[in-house]
Image (cartoon, coloured by chain):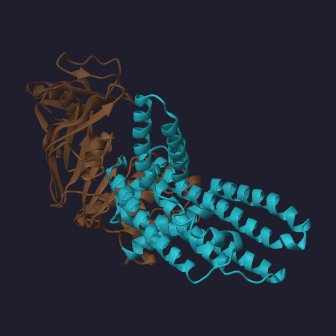
Amino acid sequence: MIVASDVRVNFKQGVRRRVIRALDGFSITVNCGDVYGLLGPNGAGKSTAMYCFLGLIRPASGEIRVDGEIPVPGEPLFRRLAYLPEEPHYHQYLTVQEALRYYTRLHDATIPASRQDEVIERLGLAEYRDLRLDKCSKGMKQKLGIAACLVTDPKLVFLDEPTRGLDPVVVKEFRDIILEMNRQGTTFVINSHVLSEVEMVCNRVAIMDHGRVMVQDDLSRLMKIDRDTYVVEYGGPESLAVPAYVTAAPALNGVVRGTFPATHLADFMQFAGGSGITVLSCSLKRLNLEEAFFNVLKGGAP
Amino acid sequence: MKEAFLANLSVHLTFFRRNRLVVLVGLFLVFIWGTTLIPSLFFISSRDKFQLIKMLMEQSHWFVMVFVAALAIMTLSYNFNQRCFKMVITKPCPPEVWLLALYAAVMLVAAVLYALVTAAALILFGVWHIPLQWGVLYLFGESLLQVAVIVSILSFLVTVMHPFMAVILMGLANESTFYGLLVMLSAAVSHASEPWARFWCKAANVVTYGFYLAVPSYSLFEKKVEKLHSSLRMGWGDLQWLGLSLLYTLLVASLFFALTALALRRRRHT
């Protein structure tokens, strides 16, 4: 669906026109049906990469193909794409309904008004449909962006920080929409700082730093199981001394979370039986995305 | 493309209607128009009535031209500064369609305003029992073509530079400035006593003449229709100048449309 190979983008900054490498040998492959997360610290080049996918920035070298075509703004390729920008750059003088109608008309004139109404209802914008965008909150503008993406039934959706400014209810609704559209075959590229959110919706991620892709893999492989360590949660008296092989964090709401080497599993079971603690859970440790992310940024393997 | 054009046209017109700055500019122009013209309606001798109609038309045409140019500048600046142009070109809508819709919206407003001015002039002709002069219709067409040239050049300048700089450049680098410079340099050439001074003045004269020819004209056949402008009398022969002006306007507007479209494609919209 998207192939970027050895893409380089340079920006010139300041009076001396100092060259900054925004993308430096950036290469990724997004397959059809992926929910692909672009992760990285600020300045890693995530937004620049997204602008390249949309043809808004032309690479100095390398090639980007989106659905088999080199993206050029305004071309028919965009009939199959949708884009939700990081900042709501909408026509602020339009009302919610007018803006949605405008963006829909630019996209595809055959989309009926009933479909627009349906999307407006679904995102809870019905009572604000006649409100001008300069009077809308950031969350409402973001909802409009989501509505504009949804209404055209695109094949590929680019989401730049999609849940910024949204309340938890809409975040959940939005997540459900992504997963539902993905089940129907829509591919997503999501640029987000919220790792927990990426963890919940993405099947593949690329971790970027300094304009390069450090790691690109399936999320399941990044969040691998550590077979050498167990994670245990138990409840019991706070004064209870734990064996030296257990690394335990201070109790939170009466629950202690700790880890111990897999070789001590039998010892721990014996300790649990003898001390009278209530073991709430005990499983092999699974690396979460946050840990994988920081491992990669520290220069190690995920 | 037709639907995208109509959608853009409608949104540009909505912008004109709702933008407070546009309304302020409009009100300001109406205020100036009113303060200049209304008192003279009450203190006028009958022989000056024709002159008053002419003045009304000239001033109104100038105000409309400024107002419409301001609309074009504000629309472009808004779309660039608010970065909402990005929302247009990330849809299957080429920048050229958006730009064409902007031209159309601005020209539509200009046509309506000029039509109102012309209608007002025709009404005054009738009310004051002055024989109707068809030159008012010529002025309507000529002014519309002038606006088309100005809007196309301004659109290009605002796309490649800051709007303030664009207005300054438009005000300075025009036909009459270079004509004035040519007159000055010609005088300098004939009065220069030193050979090197004469050489540099001649060189500057040639360069200035080049610019004078290259800079687009806002009223190409001004000298040819001088009589029409003073008497508002139009003969069939005058229509040829309007026809040629139309051709010239189409040429200049197309050239600057292409340049603006190119600049829009090259500009970074992130």
Q: Position of residue B125 (x, y in %)?
A: 78, 80
Quarter of the image that includes the C terminus of chain A? top left
Q: Nearer the viewer, residue A188 or B244?
A: B244
Q: Is residue A17 left or right of residue B80?
A: left
Q: Residue at the far left: name it.
A: A263
Q: Where is residue B160 in the image (x, y as percent from the top left)?
A: 41, 47
Asked whether the viewer can see residue B12, the reply is no
Q: How many labels does the image show?
A: 0
Q: Is residue B43 left or right of residue A68?
A: right
Q: Which of A251 and B268 is in front in this view?
A: B268
Quarter of the image that includes the N terminus of chain A? bottom left
Q: Which of B133 and A164 is in front in this view?
A: B133
Q: Residue at x 50, y 59 (%)?
A: B217
Give the quadrant of residue B67. bottom right
Asked whether the viewer can see residue B32, the reply is yes
- Please say if A288 is above or below B40: above
Q: The brown chain is which one?
A: A
Q: Residue at the far front: name it.
A: B193
Q: Position of residue B193 (x, y in %)?
A: 48, 30
Chain B: colour as depicted:
cyan
Q: Is residue A161 left or right of residue A201?
A: right
Q: Position of residue B188 (x, y in %)?
A: 51, 37
Q: Residue at x 45, y 76 (%)?
A: A113
Give the quadrant of residue B214. bottom left
Give the quadrant of residue B58. bottom right
- Please say if B133 is above or below A98: below
